[in-house]
Image (cartoon, rainbow, N blue to C red):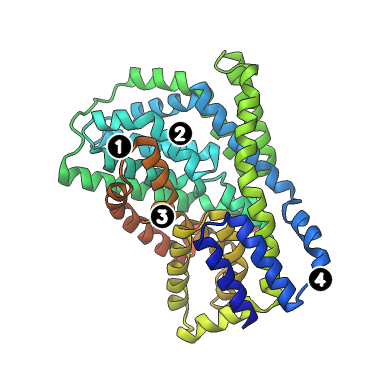
Amino acid sequence: MTVTLCLLFIVVLLVVGVPFWVTLGLGTFALLYTTDALPLSLIGEGLFEGVDSFALIAIPLFILTGDIMVRSGLAYQLLDFAEASFGSLRSGFGTSTVMGCGLFACISGSDAADAAAVGRITMDRLVERGYPKAYACALVASGACTGILIPPSIAYIILGMVLGVSATTLFQAAFVPGVMVLLAVIVTNAIINRIKGYEKSTVKFSMSRWLTALNAAKWALSIPIIILGGIYSGWFTPTESAAVAAAVAVAIGLLQNRITVAQFPTMLGTSARVCGVILPIIAVALLFAQALTVNDVPQRFVELVMAFGGDRNTVIFMMLVILVIAGCFMETSPCIVILAPLMWPLAQKVGMEQVHFCVFMITTLGLGFITPPFGLNLFVMSGLTRTPLTAIARQALPFVGAMILVAAAIGYIPQISMFTFNKS
């Protein structure tokens, strides 16, 4: 009963608009104070331990790398290369935009950053090609969902820290599912475009244009190659690859006079502000998760879900529904830190392997970024283009449906997420 009241207290604080990390902190204190689960003297130590992780250093470095790519214009070169490669296809510029989202996802590790960066570059061109503005916003928002699905991903780093799984292992397993989501968005756009005939102009493929774009983008392409190649080859840990990528991005920007030393305080400040939002949430949420565990909440949660049906298919479906709803209403970081300790025992109960569960969880949470009414990417694109949120949300529904099918396939077919996972 006490735990239930504390959870209701947290919900009330969220409804009245108290910042999430403050809400969770007050709720955690109330839970610890009323249940005597842990000594209150351990709160400070618990908060420190929550962010005392080498893996978390990768977060500001990936954010910094993405910011440099945008400010230096290297992100534009990636999109120009994507257009030269795929622009000749039916709905070619839409496909190029989504592929550009995927390429930028290999650098930034963040959905919102992906949507903002690609949206700034492509929105006017999408409208010029015949796409309605609201639909173009939905397309970019959907493509940007790959920001946390295609490695390197901030979400996988946090989940690996929470469940004690190597981020490198998760990155190995996440690549194929991430590409599947990317292809699902591309195919959905192609089908809609064929039905409604949005994209009017087509560009014939030109090898000389492709080679010119490749030459112009060679330095920009080197950064995702360094990140993914270093991680998958075992040369770098994710944190080390983030540091190397940031150093390479800085070197390219300075040597080509694309950025100046005077811009560094601004770029570092941007990275610090984003981390200033994420890290307090992680610290408090980990302590909250620990308090829930001590009070046997995960075990009760497992018993509650199993009471509705204990077979594997039913449990996976229920996890899918819970994660989509949670991802719609909450940021990914607190969702991971709070729900992972609750759901992992449930996944174990029905025989899911840990890596499979992690990939399924992140893929499903990624849906929340475009799920109406509170998908974060929808808000980003609405603010960026001054387009009504409801209009974008309606246009996003086909992409939500396609991504739900992919998430369900990943949940029910473990071989998808285990395909590139090296158990040795």
Q: CA distance from mark 3 to mark 1?
A: 24 Å
Q: As drawn, is 391 to the left or to the right of 268?
A: left
Q: Which mark is residue 117?
A: 2
Secondary structure under badge 2? helix
Dot 2 surroundings within 10 Å: few (below 14), some, or many (20 or more)?
many
Provide residue 180's location: percent of width, then percent of height: 41, 51
Q: In the displayed image of the protein, which residue is found farthest to the bottom?
A: 307
Estimate the spatial distance between the alpha carbons at disc 1 and disc 4, rounded to whole Å. 55 Å
**How much space separates mark 3 and mark 2, taking CA atoms?**
20 Å
Pick whichever of labels 1 and 2 is earlier in the sequence. Answer: 1
Closer to us: 388 or 72: 388
Q: CA distance from mark 1 to mark 2?
A: 16 Å
Q: In the rendered image, which residue does mark 3 sit on?
A: 374
Residue at the spot of label 4:
39
> Could you tell me which residue is drawn at 61 percent across and 28 percent down?
267
Q: Give the percent coordinates (x, y) of residue 395.
A: 27, 49
Q: Residue furthest front?
A: 16
Amino acid type indicated by mark 4: Pro
Local crowd at mark 3 within 10 Å, few (<14), some, or many (≥20)?
A: some
Residue with the mark numbered 1: 94
Contact check, label 3 and label 1, Cβ < 8 Å: no
The secondary element bearing badge 1 is classed as helix
Q: How far apart are the alpha carbons under marks 3 and 4?
A: 37 Å
Residue 148 picture location, percent across and down: 51, 48
